[in-house]
C-alpha cells in the first residue's frame, strides 16, 4: 500500500493560497470591483428603481461635486478635515505606541494600565462630545480630541498584543547570549513588532476617518462633516454622496500610501 502523497500537493496548495497576485492583475481586479459598483449604481438609478431623492444618478453626483469644488469652496473644507484627522491620528500614535510597548514588556504596566484602557475602549468617543465641549469648547481642540479618543485606546491594546507576540525563543536566545533587558527590547522586541504595529496604524487611520464625521457634526463651521450635515438639511443627497465619496477616496489614497511605505520599510517581510 502506497503512503498518501501529502507533502508536495499540500505544500503547493498552501503556497498558492499565500502567493501575491501580479501587480497588473491586482490592479485589474481592484478596478473591476469599482466598475461593478458603478454599474450597479447606474442600473438602480437610471432605470428608475430608486427615487433620485434617496440615490441620485452618477452624473448628478458628479455635477454636485463640480459645483462644491468650484463654487462653494469645498476644497478648503477637505483640507480642514484632513488636518484634523492627521493631527488626532498622530497624537494618538505618539502617545499610544510607547504606552502599548510599555504594557507589552512590563508586567507592572500591564496590571496597572491594560484593565483601565480596556474599560475605556468600550466607551464610544461620541459620548464624550458634551464633556469635551464643556472642557475644551467647540473649537479645533474638541474635534481633534474626538479623533484622539476614538483611536487611542484600541491602538494601545493592539500595540501591546503585537509586542507580546514576539517569539519567546528569540527572547530566550538573547538572554542566553547575555543580552540585557534594554538590548532585548531595542534589538529583538521592537524590530520584530514594528511591522505589525505599522499595519495597525493603517487600520487605526481608517477609524480616525470614521470619527471625524461625528466630530464635525457638532458646532462645526467648516469640514466635510459640516458640508454633509448642511446638505442633509437642504435635502441635497448628491452633495451628501460627494462628501462621503471624498472621504472614501482620501482614505483609500492614505491607506495605499501607508501600504507602499510599509513595503519599503519592511521589504524583508514575507507577503
Image (cartoon, rainbow, N blue to C red):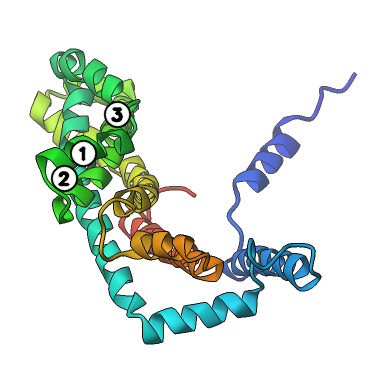
The reply to whether dot 2 and dot 1 touch (C-beta < 8 Å) is yes
The residue tagged 1 is 97
Residue 160 rendering spot, x and y as whole percentages: 27, 28
The answer to which image quadrant residue 169 occupies is top left
Label 1 close to label 3 by CB (< 8 Å): no
Up/down of 232 relative to 97, above or below? below
Judged left or right of residue 260, residue 151 is left
In percent of the image, x 27 and y 46: which residue is there?
147
Q: CA distance from mark 2 to mark 3?
A: 14 Å
Query: SS at mark 3?
Result: helix
Residue 103 x/y as whole percent:
20, 24
Residue 255, x across and y down, in percent: 41, 58
Question: Is disc 2 surrounded by few (<14), some (14 to 19) or many (20+) residues within 10 Å?
Answer: few
Measure the alpha-carbon separation of dots 2 and 1.
6 Å
> Depth check: 101 or 71 in front?
71
State how far apart marks 1 and 3 are (Cα). 9 Å
Pointer 3 residue: 157
Q: Which residue is mark 2?
A: 94
Q: Which is more toward the observer, 206 or 69?
A: 69
Amino acid at each position: 500500500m502506497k503512503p498518501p502523497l501529502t507533502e508536495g500537493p499540500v505544500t503547493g496548495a498552501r503556497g498558492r493560497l499565500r502567493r501575491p497576485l501580479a501587480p497588473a492583475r491586482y490592479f485589474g481586479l481592484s478596478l473591476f470591483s469599482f466598475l461593478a459598483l458603478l454599474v450597479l449604481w447606474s442600473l438602480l438609478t437610471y432605470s428608475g428603481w430608486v427615487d433620485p431623492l434617496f440615490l441620485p444618478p452618477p452624473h448628478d453626483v458628479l455635477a454636485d461635486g463640480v459645483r462644491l469644488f468650484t463654487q462653494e469652496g469645498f476644497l478648503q473644507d477637505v483640507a480642514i478635515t484632513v488636518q484634523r484627522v492627521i493631527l488626532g491620528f498622530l497624537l494618538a500614535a505618539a502617545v499610544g505606541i510607547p504606552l502599548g510597548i510599555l504594557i507589552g514588556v512590563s508586567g507592572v504596566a500591564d496590571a496597572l494600565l491594560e484593565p483601565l484602557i480596556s474599560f475605556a475602549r468600550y466607551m464610544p468617543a461620541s459620548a464624550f462630545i458634551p464633556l469635551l465641549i464643556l472642557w475644551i469648547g467647540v473649537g479645533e481642540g474638541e474635534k481633534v480630541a474626538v479623533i484622539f479618543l476614538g483611536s487611542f485606546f484600541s491602538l494601545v491594546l493592539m500595540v501591546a498584543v503585537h509586542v507580546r507576540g514576539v517569539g519567546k525563543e528569540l527572547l530566550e536566545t538573547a538572554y542566553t547570549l547575555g543580552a540585557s533587558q534594554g538590548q532585548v527590547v531595542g534589538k529583538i522586541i521592537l524590530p520584530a513588532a514594528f511591522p505589525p504595529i505599522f499595519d495597525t496604524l493603517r487600520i487605526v487611520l481608517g477609524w480616525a476617518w470614521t470619527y471625524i464625521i461625528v466630530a464635525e457634526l457638532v458646532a462645526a463651521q467648516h469640514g466635510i462633516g459640516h458640508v454633509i450635515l448642511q446638505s442633509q438639511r437642504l435635502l441635497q443627497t448628491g452633495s451628501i454622496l460627494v462628501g462621503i465619496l471624498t472621504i472614501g477616496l482620501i482614505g483609500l489614497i492614505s491607506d495605499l500610501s501607508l501600504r507602499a511605505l510599509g513595503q519599503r520599510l519592511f521589504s524583508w517581510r514575507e507577503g
